[in-house]
Amino acid sequence: MTTDLAVVSKAIQPTTTRLADYTSADAVLFEVKSQADLALATEAINDLKHIAKELELHKQSVTGPIQKGLNTVRSWFSVHEKQVAGARALWDSKIVTYLKAVREEQAQIRVEAQAAIARKDVEAAKEAIVRFEPPPKAVGLSVKDEWDFEVVDITKINPRYTIVSFVEVRAEMRRQVKQGVDPELEGIRFFKRNVVRATG
């Protein structure tokens, strides 16, 4: 079947011509006042039912191949979309792993510096301070901690958060974080995870 709307329009012209009769000025003025009028109106609505079916068949003859083509295209692209998602997960994990290592190293240096200061070891404190570096940055990269959660004991979770779905849990998590406290719900462990966003 063709998807050329000019061709389709010509094919459905007999049907649309019949349809026009039912919305004409005469049709608008027509009133059902007798049994004969009722029979005529009944004939009209039955014909309109057939017109609707005819139009639907014509529509499907056009949209069917299009839909099939769209499904083929979606299927073809989905392979690449999954590949992109996998690649993002791979590279995000590399960035997160590096940033975590840097963070742990800097935390250790801070501990060493504080210990050196506490024992009044000026040289060791200077050495630690020199090694201390600001958090790494890259143009086109934004990394921040976001709260997330995982279920550790479903038997302890308030039914409100299991029956409704995790949307409620996230809403409660955000509410508590907004209040400036670490989120807590019995049966759920909240934690922060690095979320990497491309900003370039």
Image (spheres, rainbow, N blue to C red):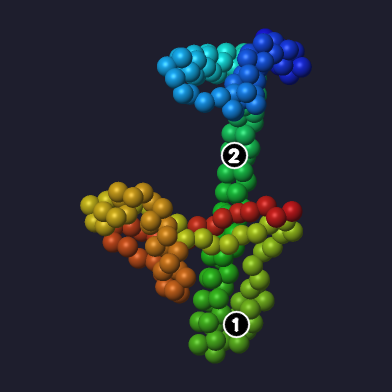
Task: Let me know if residue 101 appears in the view.
Answer: no
The x and y percentages for residue 199 are 70, 55
Q: Residue at x 62, y 43 (%)?
A: 88
Residue depicted at 59% across the width and 23% down the height? 27
Q: Position of residue 145 (x, y in %)?
A: 54, 62
Mark 1 residue crowding within 10 angstroms, few (<14) / some (14–19) / many (20+): many
Mark 1: amino acid: Ala
Residue 158 is at least partly visible in this image: yes
Q: Residue 71: which quarter of the image?
A: top right
Callout 2: few (<14), some (14-19), or many (20+) C-alpha neighbours within 10 Å? few
**In the rendered structure, which amino acid carries the disc numbered 2?**
Ala
Quadrant in the picture for the N terminus = top right
Locate residue 133: give its quadrant. Answer: bottom right
- Residue at 30%, 49% (x, y): give it: 163
Location of residue 150 in the rendering, given as x and y in whole percent from the top left corner:
38, 52
Residue 39: image quadrant is top left
Helix, strand or loop at label 2? It is helix
Of residues 134 and 176, the one drawn nearer to the viewer in this rendering: 176
Residue at x 36% of width, y 59% of height: 189
Residue 179 vs residue 45, the one in the foreground: 45
Q: Which residue is mark 1?
A: 125
Which residue in the rendered view is the most extreme toward the bottom? Answer: 120
Element carrying mark 1: helix
- Residue reaching furthest left? 155
The circle on residue 85 is 2
For the residue pair 35 and 85, the one nearer the viewer reads as: 35
Marks 2, 1: nearer the viewer = 2
